Image (cartoon, helix red, strand yellow):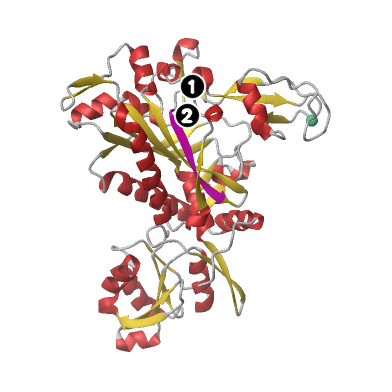
Amino acid sequence: MSRRSDPRPELFDKITSLAKRRGFVFPSSEIYGGAGATWDFGPLGVELKNNVKRSWWRAMTQLRDDVVGIDGAILMHPRVWEASGHVENFVDPLIECGSCRKRYRIDELPDGDALMVRWRAGALDSSGMPCPSCNEKRLSQPRKFNLMFKTFVGPVEDSASVAWLRPETAQSIYVDFENVQQSMRRKLPFGIAQIGKAFRNEITPGNFIFRSREFEQMEMQYFCHPSQAGALFDQWKGVRKAWHRALGTPEEWLRFRDHAMDERAHYAAAATDIEFRFPFGWKELEGIHNRTDYDLKRHAECSGKNIEYFDDERKEHYVPNVVETSVGADRATFAVLCAAYDEEPDKEGTRVVLRFTPELAPYKVAILPLSKKPELSGLAGEVWAKVRPHVMSTYDETQAIGRRYRRQDEIGTPLCVTVDFDSLTDRQVTIRERDSMAQVRIPIDELVPTLKAKLRG
Ligand SMILES: [Zn+2]
Protein backbone atom coordinates (compact mmCIF):
# COMPACT_ATOMS: atom_id res chain seq x y z
CA MET A 1 0.00 0.00 0.00
CA SER A 2 1.35 3.41 -0.87
CA ARG A 3 1.73 6.05 1.81
CA ARG A 4 -1.31 8.25 2.11
CA SER A 5 -0.73 11.40 0.22
CA ASP A 6 -0.40 14.59 2.22
CA PRO A 7 -3.15 17.18 1.88
CA ARG A 8 -2.37 19.49 -0.97
CA PRO A 9 -4.35 22.02 -2.97
CA GLU A 10 -4.89 19.75 -5.98
CA LEU A 11 -6.54 17.19 -3.70
CA PHE A 12 -9.54 19.53 -3.49
CA ASP A 13 -10.07 19.45 -7.26
CA LYS A 14 -9.48 15.73 -7.45
CA ILE A 15 -12.06 14.99 -4.77
CA THR A 16 -14.74 17.38 -6.03
CA SER A 17 -14.38 16.03 -9.56
CA LEU A 18 -14.44 12.40 -8.42
CA ALA A 19 -17.45 13.18 -6.20
CA LYS A 20 -19.41 14.47 -9.17
CA ARG A 21 -18.22 11.94 -11.76
CA ARG A 22 -18.86 8.91 -9.55
CA GLY A 23 -22.18 9.95 -7.98
CA PHE A 24 -21.15 11.11 -4.52
CA VAL A 25 -22.11 14.80 -4.55
CA PHE A 26 -23.76 17.05 -7.15
CA PRO A 27 -24.54 20.77 -7.02
CA SER A 28 -28.23 21.11 -6.14
CA SER A 29 -30.53 22.30 -8.97
CA GLU A 30 -27.59 22.15 -11.36
CA ILE A 31 -29.67 22.35 -14.56
CA TYR A 32 -30.86 25.76 -13.32
CA GLY A 33 -27.32 26.89 -12.63
CA GLY A 34 -27.21 25.71 -9.02
CA ALA A 35 -28.88 27.03 -5.87
CA GLY A 36 -26.44 29.02 -3.77
CA ALA A 37 -24.08 26.52 -2.17
CA THR A 38 -26.51 23.69 -1.63
CA TRP A 39 -25.55 20.15 -2.53
CA ASP A 40 -27.25 16.87 -3.32
CA PHE A 41 -25.75 13.58 -2.25
CA GLY A 42 -25.90 11.10 -5.12
CA PRO A 43 -26.36 7.32 -4.93
CA LEU A 44 -22.87 6.68 -3.53
CA GLY A 45 -22.79 9.86 -1.44
CA VAL A 46 -25.99 9.00 0.39
CA GLU A 47 -24.57 5.56 1.25
CA LEU A 48 -21.32 7.10 2.49
CA LYS A 49 -23.02 9.82 4.54
CA ASN A 50 -25.54 7.35 5.99
CA ASN A 51 -22.62 5.16 7.02
CA VAL A 52 -20.93 8.12 8.74
CA LYS A 53 -24.17 8.94 10.55
CA ARG A 54 -24.78 5.29 11.46
CA SER A 55 -21.27 5.04 12.87
CA TRP A 56 -21.81 8.15 15.01
CA TRP A 57 -25.22 6.98 16.21
CA ARG A 58 -23.89 3.55 17.08
CA ALA A 59 -20.90 4.98 18.97
CA MET A 60 -22.97 7.59 20.80
CA THR A 61 -26.13 5.62 21.67
CA GLN A 62 -25.97 1.88 21.02
CA LEU A 63 -22.53 1.35 22.59
CA ARG A 64 -23.16 3.62 25.60
CA ASP A 65 -25.54 3.16 28.49
CA ASP A 66 -25.58 6.89 29.30
CA VAL A 67 -26.78 8.51 26.04
CA VAL A 68 -30.22 8.32 24.39
CA GLY A 69 -31.39 9.78 21.09
CA ILE A 70 -34.15 12.07 19.85
CA ASP A 71 -35.25 13.45 16.49
CA GLY A 72 -36.58 16.97 17.04
CA ALA A 73 -38.62 19.15 14.70
CA ILE A 74 -36.89 21.70 12.47
CA LEU A 75 -39.57 24.31 13.16
CA MET A 76 -39.71 25.31 16.82
CA HIS A 77 -41.47 27.96 18.89
CA PRO A 78 -39.91 31.31 17.90
CA ARG A 79 -39.16 32.15 21.54
CA VAL A 80 -36.67 29.26 21.59
CA TRP A 81 -34.39 31.42 19.45
CA GLU A 82 -34.87 34.47 21.63
CA ALA A 83 -33.93 32.41 24.67
CA SER A 84 -30.91 30.89 22.95
CA GLY A 85 -29.69 34.33 21.90
CA HIS A 86 -29.83 33.54 18.19
CA VAL A 87 -32.32 36.30 17.29
CA GLU A 88 -30.02 38.91 18.78
CA ASN A 89 -26.55 37.45 18.50
CA PHE A 90 -26.41 34.89 15.71
CA VAL A 91 -25.03 37.45 13.35
CA ASP A 92 -22.08 37.85 11.07
CA PRO A 93 -20.55 41.27 10.53
CA LEU A 94 -21.02 42.11 6.86
CA ILE A 95 -19.00 44.70 4.97
CA GLU A 96 -19.80 45.74 1.42
CA CYS A 97 -17.51 47.46 -1.04
CA GLY A 98 -19.12 50.66 -2.39
CA SER A 99 -17.09 50.35 -5.55
CA CYS A 100 -17.14 46.70 -6.72
CA ARG A 101 -20.12 45.64 -4.55
CA LYS A 102 -18.30 42.61 -3.22
CA ARG A 103 -19.45 41.46 0.25
CA TYR A 104 -17.20 40.14 2.97
CA ARG A 105 -17.46 38.75 6.43
CA ILE A 106 -14.93 40.68 8.49
CA ASP A 107 -12.94 37.55 9.27
CA GLU A 108 -12.33 37.04 5.54
CA LEU A 109 -10.48 40.34 5.22
CA PRO A 110 -6.70 40.44 5.63
CA ASP A 111 -5.85 40.13 9.33
CA GLY A 112 -9.48 39.06 9.85
CA ASP A 113 -9.05 37.52 13.30
CA ALA A 114 -7.72 40.77 14.72
CA LEU A 115 -10.54 42.70 13.02
CA MET A 116 -13.10 40.35 14.58
CA VAL A 117 -11.72 41.02 18.03
CA ARG A 118 -12.04 44.76 17.43
CA TRP A 119 -15.56 44.35 16.03
CA ARG A 120 -16.69 42.33 19.04
CA ALA A 121 -15.35 45.09 21.25
CA GLY A 122 -17.37 47.63 19.18
CA ALA A 123 -14.18 49.36 18.09
CA LEU A 124 -13.88 48.55 14.40
CA ASP A 125 -13.85 51.43 11.92
CA SER A 126 -13.64 50.19 8.35
CA SER A 127 -13.24 53.58 6.67
CA GLY A 128 -9.79 53.85 5.15
CA MET A 129 -9.45 50.08 4.74
CA PRO A 130 -8.86 48.96 1.13
CA CYS A 131 -11.17 46.43 -0.56
CA PRO A 132 -9.17 43.19 -1.09
CA SER A 133 -10.77 42.79 -4.50
CA CYS A 134 -10.62 46.25 -6.15
CA ASN A 135 -8.34 48.06 -3.67
CA GLU A 136 -10.72 51.08 -3.46
CA LYS A 137 -11.14 52.49 0.04
CA ARG A 138 -14.94 52.50 -0.08
CA LEU A 139 -15.84 49.73 2.37
CA SER A 140 -19.07 50.21 4.32
CA GLN A 141 -19.15 50.09 8.11
CA PRO A 142 -19.90 46.55 9.34
CA ARG A 143 -23.57 45.71 9.68
CA LYS A 144 -25.05 42.78 11.53
CA PHE A 145 -26.54 40.11 9.35
CA ASN A 146 -28.63 37.40 11.03
CA LEU A 147 -27.79 33.96 9.71
CA MET A 148 -31.17 32.38 10.47
CA PHE A 149 -33.61 31.68 7.63
CA LYS A 150 -36.96 33.27 8.40
CA THR A 151 -40.31 31.87 7.38
CA PHE A 152 -43.95 32.15 8.40
CA VAL A 153 -46.28 29.60 9.95
CA GLY A 154 -49.82 29.67 8.59
CA PRO A 155 -51.31 31.79 5.80
CA VAL A 156 -50.47 35.25 7.14
CA GLU A 157 -47.01 36.73 6.84
CA ASP A 158 -46.85 38.97 9.88
CA SER A 159 -44.58 39.30 12.89
CA ALA A 160 -46.82 37.05 14.99
CA SER A 161 -46.34 34.14 12.60
CA VAL A 162 -42.55 34.30 12.22
CA ALA A 163 -40.70 31.02 12.49
CA TRP A 164 -37.06 30.19 11.90
CA LEU A 165 -35.44 27.21 10.29
CA ARG A 166 -33.28 25.93 13.14
CA PRO A 167 -29.63 27.00 12.86
CA GLU A 168 -28.55 24.16 15.16
CA THR A 169 -30.12 20.98 16.49
CA ALA A 170 -28.99 21.53 20.09
CA GLN A 171 -31.95 23.66 21.18
CA SER A 172 -34.51 20.87 20.82
CA ILE A 173 -32.33 18.79 23.11
CA TYR A 174 -32.40 21.54 25.76
CA VAL A 175 -36.14 22.10 25.55
CA ASP A 176 -36.79 18.34 25.59
CA PHE A 177 -34.43 17.74 28.52
CA GLU A 178 -37.15 17.24 31.09
CA ASN A 179 -39.35 15.10 28.82
CA VAL A 180 -36.46 12.79 28.05
CA GLN A 181 -35.15 12.66 31.61
CA GLN A 182 -38.57 11.83 33.05
CA SER A 183 -39.90 9.49 30.35
CA MET A 184 -36.66 7.49 30.35
CA ARG A 185 -36.24 7.77 34.17
CA ARG A 186 -32.66 8.93 33.70
CA LYS A 187 -30.30 10.01 36.44
CA LEU A 188 -27.54 12.52 35.82
CA PRO A 189 -25.08 12.38 34.25
CA PHE A 190 -26.56 11.36 30.91
CA GLY A 191 -26.59 12.65 27.35
CA ILE A 192 -29.06 13.20 24.52
CA ALA A 193 -27.92 12.73 20.93
CA GLN A 194 -29.52 13.94 17.72
CA ILE A 195 -28.81 13.91 14.00
CA GLY A 196 -30.71 16.41 11.90
CA LYS A 197 -30.78 19.22 9.39
CA ALA A 198 -29.86 22.77 10.27
CA PHE A 199 -29.82 25.93 8.16
CA ARG A 200 -27.61 28.99 8.11
CA ASN A 201 -27.84 31.80 5.63
CA GLU A 202 -24.07 32.09 5.24
CA ILE A 203 -22.81 35.24 3.53
CA THR A 204 -19.97 33.38 1.89
CA PRO A 205 -20.49 29.64 1.88
CA GLY A 206 -17.95 27.58 0.07
CA ASN A 207 -15.26 24.97 -0.14
CA PHE A 208 -17.65 22.34 -1.51
CA ILE A 209 -19.67 20.69 1.28
CA PHE A 210 -17.46 22.19 4.00
CA ARG A 211 -19.75 25.18 4.52
CA SER A 212 -23.22 25.16 3.00
CA ARG A 213 -26.50 26.83 3.83
CA GLU A 214 -28.33 23.58 4.49
CA PHE A 215 -26.43 20.92 6.36
CA GLU A 216 -26.76 18.09 8.80
CA GLN A 217 -25.49 18.09 12.37
CA MET A 218 -24.67 15.30 14.77
CA GLU A 219 -24.90 16.83 18.23
CA MET A 220 -24.85 15.46 21.75
CA GLN A 221 -25.56 17.34 24.96
CA TYR A 222 -24.28 15.70 28.13
CA PHE A 223 -26.05 16.86 31.29
CA CYS A 224 -24.18 16.71 34.57
CA HIS A 225 -23.60 18.18 38.03
CA PRO A 226 -21.64 21.46 37.78
CA SER A 227 -18.67 19.92 39.59
CA GLN A 228 -18.30 17.23 36.90
CA ALA A 229 -18.32 19.41 33.79
CA GLY A 230 -14.59 20.14 33.63
CA ALA A 231 -13.52 16.50 33.80
CA LEU A 232 -16.28 15.42 31.40
CA PHE A 233 -15.18 18.06 28.89
CA ASP A 234 -11.69 16.50 28.87
CA GLN A 235 -13.14 12.99 28.63
CA TRP A 236 -15.35 13.85 25.67
CA LYS A 237 -12.39 15.38 23.83
CA GLY A 238 -10.66 12.01 23.93
CA VAL A 239 -13.79 10.02 23.07
CA ARG A 240 -14.59 12.17 20.05
CA LYS A 241 -11.09 12.17 18.64
CA ALA A 242 -11.01 8.38 18.94
CA TRP A 243 -14.20 8.21 16.86
CA HIS A 244 -12.58 10.17 14.02
CA ARG A 245 -9.55 7.87 14.22
CA ALA A 246 -11.82 4.81 14.01
CA LEU A 247 -13.21 6.15 10.72
CA GLY A 248 -9.73 5.69 9.28
CA THR A 249 -8.48 9.27 9.66
CA PRO A 250 -4.72 9.32 10.34
CA GLU A 251 -3.59 10.82 13.64
CA GLU A 252 -1.51 13.47 11.89
CA TRP A 253 -4.59 14.84 10.08
CA LEU A 254 -6.35 15.68 13.35
CA ARG A 255 -5.52 18.17 16.08
CA PHE A 256 -7.17 20.05 18.94
CA ARG A 257 -7.38 23.81 18.91
CA ASP A 258 -8.54 25.42 22.13
CA HIS A 259 -10.54 28.60 21.74
CA ALA A 260 -9.05 31.74 23.19
CA MET A 261 -11.13 33.70 25.72
CA ASP A 262 -12.12 36.35 23.18
CA GLU A 263 -13.43 33.92 20.54
CA ARG A 264 -15.69 31.78 22.69
CA ALA A 265 -19.22 32.62 23.77
CA HIS A 266 -19.36 34.54 27.04
CA TYR A 267 -21.12 31.70 28.87
CA ALA A 268 -18.78 28.94 27.67
CA ALA A 269 -16.31 27.79 30.31
CA ALA A 270 -14.17 25.98 27.74
CA ALA A 271 -14.29 25.29 24.03
CA THR A 272 -12.09 23.33 21.70
CA ASP A 273 -12.22 22.35 18.05
CA ILE A 274 -11.11 19.06 16.61
CA GLU A 275 -9.48 20.36 13.45
CA PHE A 276 -8.93 18.35 10.29
CA ARG A 277 -6.29 19.01 7.69
CA PHE A 278 -8.59 19.82 4.76
CA PRO A 279 -6.97 20.46 1.34
CA PHE A 280 -7.44 24.21 2.04
CA GLY A 281 -5.84 24.04 5.48
CA TRP A 282 -6.62 23.16 9.10
CA LYS A 283 -10.32 23.79 9.74
CA GLU A 284 -12.92 22.89 12.34
CA LEU A 285 -14.38 19.42 11.99
CA GLU A 286 -16.03 19.16 15.41
CA GLY A 287 -16.65 21.49 18.33
CA ILE A 288 -16.60 20.43 21.99
CA HIS A 289 -17.93 22.94 24.49
CA ASN A 290 -18.48 23.24 28.19
CA ARG A 291 -21.65 25.39 28.04
CA THR A 292 -22.22 25.52 31.82
CA ASP A 293 -25.90 25.91 32.81
CA TYR A 294 -26.45 28.77 30.37
CA ASP A 295 -28.92 27.14 27.95
CA LEU A 296 -31.20 25.48 30.49
CA LYS A 297 -31.24 28.63 32.63
CA ARG A 298 -32.18 30.76 29.63
CA HIS A 299 -35.02 28.40 28.69
CA ALA A 300 -36.20 28.36 32.30
CA GLU A 301 -36.25 32.18 32.33
CA CYS A 302 -37.98 32.60 28.98
CA SER A 303 -40.54 29.79 29.36
CA GLY A 304 -41.24 30.43 33.03
CA LYS A 305 -40.80 26.73 33.67
CA ASN A 306 -38.56 25.40 36.40
CA ILE A 307 -35.93 23.15 34.77
CA GLU A 308 -34.08 22.23 37.94
CA TYR A 309 -33.10 18.65 38.50
CA PHE A 310 -33.37 16.95 41.87
CA ASP A 311 -30.36 14.75 42.51
CA ASP A 312 -31.55 12.21 45.06
CA GLU A 313 -28.06 10.94 45.78
CA ARG A 314 -26.68 14.40 46.50
CA LYS A 315 -30.02 15.60 47.97
CA GLU A 316 -29.59 18.73 45.92
CA HIS A 317 -31.61 20.77 43.42
CA TYR A 318 -29.61 22.28 40.60
CA VAL A 319 -29.67 23.31 36.93
CA PRO A 320 -27.55 20.74 35.06
CA ASN A 321 -24.38 21.80 33.29
CA VAL A 322 -23.88 20.75 29.70
CA VAL A 323 -20.89 19.45 27.78
CA GLU A 324 -21.67 19.50 24.07
CA THR A 325 -20.10 17.71 21.13
CA SER A 326 -21.11 18.94 17.68
CA VAL A 327 -19.96 17.67 14.30
CA GLY A 328 -21.34 18.24 10.82
CA ALA A 329 -22.33 15.07 8.98
CA ASP A 330 -21.49 16.68 5.62
CA ARG A 331 -18.16 17.98 6.87
CA ALA A 332 -17.31 14.60 8.40
CA THR A 333 -18.20 12.94 5.09
CA PHE A 334 -15.91 15.38 3.26
CA ALA A 335 -13.13 14.65 5.76
CA VAL A 336 -13.36 10.89 5.28
CA LEU A 337 -13.28 11.38 1.50
CA CYS A 338 -10.07 13.42 1.87
CA ALA A 339 -8.50 10.94 4.28
CA ALA A 340 -9.43 7.95 2.10
CA TYR A 341 -8.17 9.36 -1.21
CA ASP A 342 -5.00 7.74 -2.44
CA GLU A 343 -3.14 7.30 -5.72
CA GLU A 344 -0.49 4.83 -6.67
CA PRO A 345 1.40 4.24 -9.90
CA ASP A 346 0.45 1.18 -11.91
CA LYS A 347 0.99 -0.06 -15.45
CA GLU A 348 -1.90 2.00 -16.84
CA GLY A 349 -0.63 5.15 -15.14
CA THR A 350 -2.31 5.82 -11.84
CA ARG A 351 -4.58 3.72 -9.67
CA VAL A 352 -6.97 5.94 -7.69
CA VAL A 353 -8.23 4.28 -4.52
CA LEU A 354 -10.63 5.46 -1.85
CA ARG A 355 -9.34 3.54 1.15
CA PHE A 356 -12.59 3.60 3.12
CA THR A 357 -12.95 1.32 6.10
CA PRO A 358 -15.46 -1.45 5.28
CA GLU A 359 -17.92 0.26 7.65
CA LEU A 360 -17.90 3.45 5.56
CA ALA A 361 -17.59 2.04 2.03
CA PRO A 362 -20.77 2.71 -0.01
CA TYR A 363 -20.59 -0.80 -1.47
CA LYS A 364 -18.83 -3.51 0.50
CA VAL A 365 -18.75 -6.01 -2.37
CA ALA A 366 -18.96 -5.88 -6.18
CA ILE A 367 -19.97 -8.97 -8.16
CA LEU A 368 -18.14 -9.07 -11.50
CA PRO A 369 -18.72 -11.82 -14.08
CA LEU A 370 -15.58 -12.15 -16.22
CA SER A 371 -17.60 -11.56 -19.38
CA LYS A 372 -21.12 -10.67 -20.43
CA LYS A 373 -21.83 -14.18 -21.77
CA PRO A 374 -25.31 -15.31 -20.63
CA GLU A 375 -24.07 -18.51 -18.96
CA LEU A 376 -21.82 -16.40 -16.68
CA SER A 377 -24.53 -13.81 -16.03
CA GLY A 378 -26.79 -16.58 -14.76
CA LEU A 379 -24.31 -17.83 -12.18
CA ALA A 380 -23.15 -14.31 -11.26
CA GLY A 381 -26.78 -13.31 -10.66
CA GLU A 382 -27.14 -16.33 -8.39
CA VAL A 383 -23.99 -15.29 -6.48
CA TRP A 384 -25.26 -11.71 -6.12
CA ALA A 385 -28.59 -12.99 -4.79
CA LYS A 386 -26.67 -14.85 -2.06
CA VAL A 387 -24.61 -11.79 -1.10
CA ARG A 388 -27.07 -8.88 -1.25
CA PRO A 389 -29.21 -9.68 1.81
CA HIS A 390 -26.04 -9.55 3.94
CA VAL A 391 -24.09 -6.51 2.72
CA MET A 392 -24.62 -3.50 0.46
CA SER A 393 -23.32 -4.71 -2.88
CA THR A 394 -23.29 -3.92 -6.59
CA TYR A 395 -23.01 -5.73 -9.91
CA ASP A 396 -21.03 -4.72 -12.99
CA GLU A 397 -20.54 -6.68 -16.22
CA THR A 398 -19.51 -4.00 -18.71
CA GLN A 399 -15.94 -3.53 -20.04
CA ALA A 400 -12.74 -5.43 -19.31
CA ILE A 401 -12.27 -6.88 -15.84
CA GLY A 402 -9.22 -4.67 -15.14
CA ARG A 403 -11.22 -1.50 -15.83
CA ARG A 404 -14.00 -2.72 -13.59
CA TYR A 405 -11.56 -3.37 -10.71
CA ARG A 406 -10.29 0.21 -11.14
CA ARG A 407 -13.84 1.56 -11.07
CA GLN A 408 -14.52 -0.24 -7.79
CA ASP A 409 -11.17 0.96 -6.34
CA GLU A 410 -12.13 4.52 -7.20
CA ILE A 411 -15.37 4.31 -5.21
CA GLY A 412 -13.73 2.43 -2.35
CA THR A 413 -15.35 -1.02 -2.65
CA PRO A 414 -13.22 -3.24 -0.36
CA LEU A 415 -13.92 -6.58 -2.08
CA CYS A 416 -14.67 -7.77 -5.62
CA VAL A 417 -16.01 -11.23 -6.41
CA THR A 418 -15.18 -12.51 -9.88
CA VAL A 419 -17.21 -15.25 -11.54
CA ASP A 420 -15.29 -16.89 -14.42
CA PHE A 421 -15.78 -19.86 -16.78
CA ASP A 422 -14.19 -22.31 -14.33
CA SER A 423 -16.82 -21.22 -11.78
CA LEU A 424 -19.43 -22.99 -13.94
CA THR A 425 -17.82 -26.37 -13.28
CA ASP A 426 -15.93 -26.03 -9.96
CA ARG A 427 -18.51 -23.77 -8.22
CA GLN A 428 -15.71 -21.50 -6.99
CA VAL A 429 -15.22 -17.72 -7.29
CA THR A 430 -12.30 -15.33 -6.80
CA ILE A 431 -12.28 -12.65 -4.10
CA ARG A 432 -10.00 -9.71 -4.85
CA GLU A 433 -9.02 -7.24 -2.12
CA ARG A 434 -8.95 -3.53 -2.91
CA ASP A 435 -5.89 -2.53 -0.88
CA SER A 436 -3.51 -5.45 -1.44
CA MET A 437 -5.06 -6.53 -4.77
CA ALA A 438 -4.48 -10.09 -3.48
CA GLN A 439 -6.84 -12.75 -4.83
CA VAL A 440 -8.14 -15.95 -3.27
CA ARG A 441 -10.37 -18.59 -4.77
CA ILE A 442 -13.09 -20.10 -2.60
CA PRO A 443 -16.22 -22.27 -2.98
CA ILE A 444 -19.46 -20.34 -3.57
CA ASP A 445 -20.95 -22.10 -0.55
CA GLU A 446 -18.34 -20.42 1.69
CA LEU A 447 -18.62 -17.01 0.04
CA VAL A 448 -20.91 -15.17 2.46
CA PRO A 449 -19.11 -16.14 5.69
CA THR A 450 -15.72 -15.45 4.04
CA LEU A 451 -16.81 -11.98 2.85
CA LYS A 452 -18.19 -11.17 6.29
CA ALA A 453 -14.95 -12.26 7.97
CA LYS A 454 -12.85 -10.18 5.57
CA LEU A 455 -15.05 -7.11 6.08
CA ARG A 456 -14.73 -7.43 9.85
CA GLY A 457 -10.96 -7.32 9.23
ZN1 LIG B 1 -14.15 46.50 -4.06
Relative to 93, does residue 418 appear above or below in the rendering? below
Relative to 200, does residue 444 appear above or below in the rendering? below
Circle 1 sits in a helix, a strand or a loop, which is it? Answer: helix
Q: Which mark is residue 86?
A: 1
Q: Which mark is residue 167?
A: 2
Q: Which mark is residue 338?
A: none
Residue 209 counted in the magenta span: no
Look at the numbered discs 2 and 1 and tell me whether their residues touch, using CB distance below 8 Å: yes
Neighbor class of circle 1 (other Cα within 10 Å; few <14, some 14-19, many 20+) is: some
Q: Which residues are magenta?
A: 269-277
Q: Main secondary structure of the magenta part?
A: strand
- Number of labels in the image equals 2
Quadrant of the picture in which ligand 1 is shown: top right
What whole-number distance in Å separates the C-alpha atoms at marks 2 and 1? 8 Å
- Residue 202, percent from left and from top: 58, 32
**Seen in the image, is 365 located left or right of residue 2?**
left
- Please report the residue visible at 72 percent of the width from the left and 35 percent of the height from the top: 110
The part of the image, by quadrant, that contains residue 155 is: top left
- Residue 231, percent from left and from top: 34, 37
Relative to 184, does residue 154 appear above or below in the rendering? above
